[in-house]
Image (cartoon, rainbow, N blue to C red):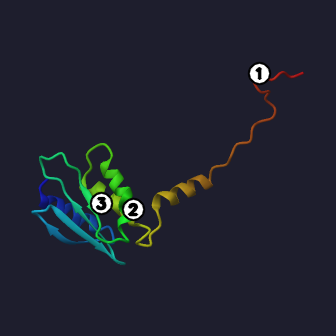
């Protein structure tokens, strides 16, 4: 995918998030993103024919630790799309943006509805004599 197509994907992604695409540098294949309150990162996109992965980083000391989840995801097996990478970055930054972590909320709601079954007492256990 050429760089302009990647930039278009990034612009579309930004329209559904608090982030803005504030700069693109085609020669470096770099895109810079920013969201209030001071959350910033950049993505380096791989060349077309190259087997490299995307690379995400932040020059902000406050933001950098939150990118670990996205960096681990990128380095895991399989090719990733720019959209998948940006979604993982967004999930990583949710606490900094003051947004709830969607996966944890869904799990808590689901697990709250699960009732533990009590073992039935009227069935004898296997291997235990009834004398």
The span from disc 2 to disc 3 (Cα, nearest Å) is 10 Å
Where is residue 3 shown, x and y percent of the image? 13, 59
Residue under numbered circle 2: 92
Q: Mark 2 near mark 3, Cβ–Cβ under 8 Å?
A: no
Tell me the SS state at disc 2: helix
In the rendered image, the residue lying farthest to the bottom is: 37
First-in-chain label (3 vs 1) = 3
Residue occupying the point 37% across, 58% down:
68
Classify residue 120 by image quadrant: top right
**x, y percent for residue 29:** 15, 61
Instruction: Give x and y (percent) for residue 30.
Output: 18, 64
* Residues at discs 1 and 2 in contact (Cβ within 8 Å): no
Mark 1 crowdedness (10 Å alpha carbons): few <14, some 14-19, many ≥20: few
Q: Is residue 130 left or right of residue 48?
A: right
Q: Give 96 or 118, whichever is nearer the viewer.
A: 96
What residue is shown with label 3? 86
- Residue reaching furthest to the left: 27
- Camera-near label (1 vs 2) is 2
Q: Please name the residue shown 18% across and 45% down the image.
A: 51
Q: Which residue is mark 1?
A: 127
């Amino acid at each position: 995918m050429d760089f302009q197509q990647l930039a278009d994907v990034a612009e579309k992604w930004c329209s559904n998030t608090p982030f803005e695409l504030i700069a693109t540098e085609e020669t470096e294949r770099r895109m810079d993103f920013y969201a209030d309150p001071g959350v910033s990162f950049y993505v380096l996109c791989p060349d077309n024919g190259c087997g490299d992965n995307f690379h995400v980083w932040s020059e902000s000391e406050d933001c950098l630790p939150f990118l670990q989840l996205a960096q681990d995801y990128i380095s895991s097996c399989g090719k990733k799309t720019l959209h998948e990478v940006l979604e993982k970055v967004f999930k990583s930054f949710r606490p900094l943006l003051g947004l709830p972590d969607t996966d944890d909320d869904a799990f808590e709601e689901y697990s709250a509805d699960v009732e533990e079954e009590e073992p039935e007492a009227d069935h004898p256990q296997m291997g235990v004599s009834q004398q």
